[in-house]
Image (cartoon, rainbow, N blue to C red):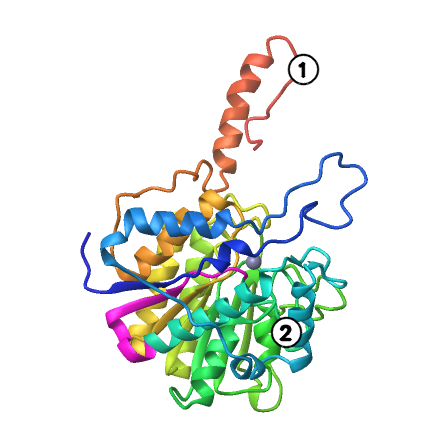
Amino acid sequence: MTGSTTLSVYWDETFVEHNPPEGSFNIPSHELVLEDEAHPDCPERVKNIKHIIEKQLGELTSWKSVTKATPEQLQRVHDAELLHEFKEFTENGGGRLQTATFTGANEHSCEAATAASGAAIQAAAEAVDTGAETVPYALVRPSGHHAQPDQMDGYCFFNNVAVAAEHLLSTGAVDDIAIIDWDVHHGNGTQEIFYDRDDLLFISLHADHRSWGEWHPQTGLPQEKGVDDGEGYNINIPLPHGAGNDGYDYVMNRLVEPVIRDFDPGMIIVSAGQDAGVMDPLARMVLTKPGFENLGAKAQSYARRYANGQLAIVQEGGYQPSHLAFATLGVLEGALGVETGVKQDPFALYPEENLDDVVKAAHETGTVLAEHWPIQFGDQET
Ligand SMILES: [Zn+2]
């Protein structure tokens, strides 16, 4: 392993103490499914990432303790009422939200969410202080990018990247920031928080999933461009299923980089959800570890070329707990400019669509079946 850039990981034990209540992933679960499915936002997600960092990037890594975000820091992006409501909710043991019922909390969740936002602040502040010397990474749970000013949503309670960005902007640490959100779901909360602002460029790459409820009115379509001073500074890049490593590379090159270059940000924060991964139960984007290495490397190269090397990475989603570890390792390898012993994605069984080989195999099988059954392929047929 080579590389002079080091990794700073902000980690707190509360990140594994937060949990949705027992029971089905979706409440109510489907009447035709007998067994409830476990909730995908499990503590194993971040435990596995922590473990793979220790095993593969240990020599480059400094583990940093977390200082919880203050109410003042959280209230720069969230209504005081939401903070009060969530604190009271968790002090009473938590449960499912009344709106997004697939989102839930327990008695530790407010502490964990407050620590997650604190970790994001620390990571972003370190990036400003150290530039290209370090890659600060907030390895947090719960995630944040769906949390709107007055609405918790999508396993998110406080918007960690938004709290971090607003802290740096309001304290004058930087003049402007670009957030690249490659979580497979639209970063609707971050969009909402900065929708009328021109000092925060928000770029979200996501599956084209649209709104998922009246509490989540944002669509993630390109036409949501921002308003007033913010017009043009909210960039949505919805992608079709199966976009894959090459598809993400294409839009990073053709859409993301030209915008970042022109905006010339003071720093870049990545909302790094790896749920575009090939094994993820919540999406069908089929990225593999090399695809995530490419994303990490591109984020770093944009930071070095256009933002004085000031790059912070904040964990968002990713729900297949094993693949998430390898995908995130890829992001960090790319951002650090190093290679570990994990060259391949061990889960990349079928990394690409492959109709040509399906046709070939079907023809071969059809030749055998044709001895007994009425299977016919025309010479030109595919
Ligand atoms: Zn997601």
**Crowding near pointer 1: few (<14 within 10 Å), some, many (20+)?**
few
In the rendered view, does 281 fall on the left or right side of 340?
Answer: right
On the image, the x and y values in percent for residue 345 come to 38, 42
Residue, x 55% and y 87% (percent of image)? 197
Label 2: element kind: loop
In the rendered view, does 241 fall on the left or right side of 249?
Answer: right
- Extreme residue in the right direction: 31
**Crowding near pointer 2: few (<14 within 10 Å), some, many (20+)?**
many
| Residue kind at label 1, given as amino acid type | Pro
Residue on which the image places disc 1: 374
Q: Locate residue 92: give its quadrant.
A: bottom right
Residue on which the image places disc 2: 148
On the image, the x and y values in percent for residue 182 come to 49, 62
Q: Locate residue 11: give its quadrant.
A: bottom left
Label 1: element kind: loop
Can residue 202 be seen in the rendering of this structure? no
| Residue kind at label 2, given as amino acid type | Gln
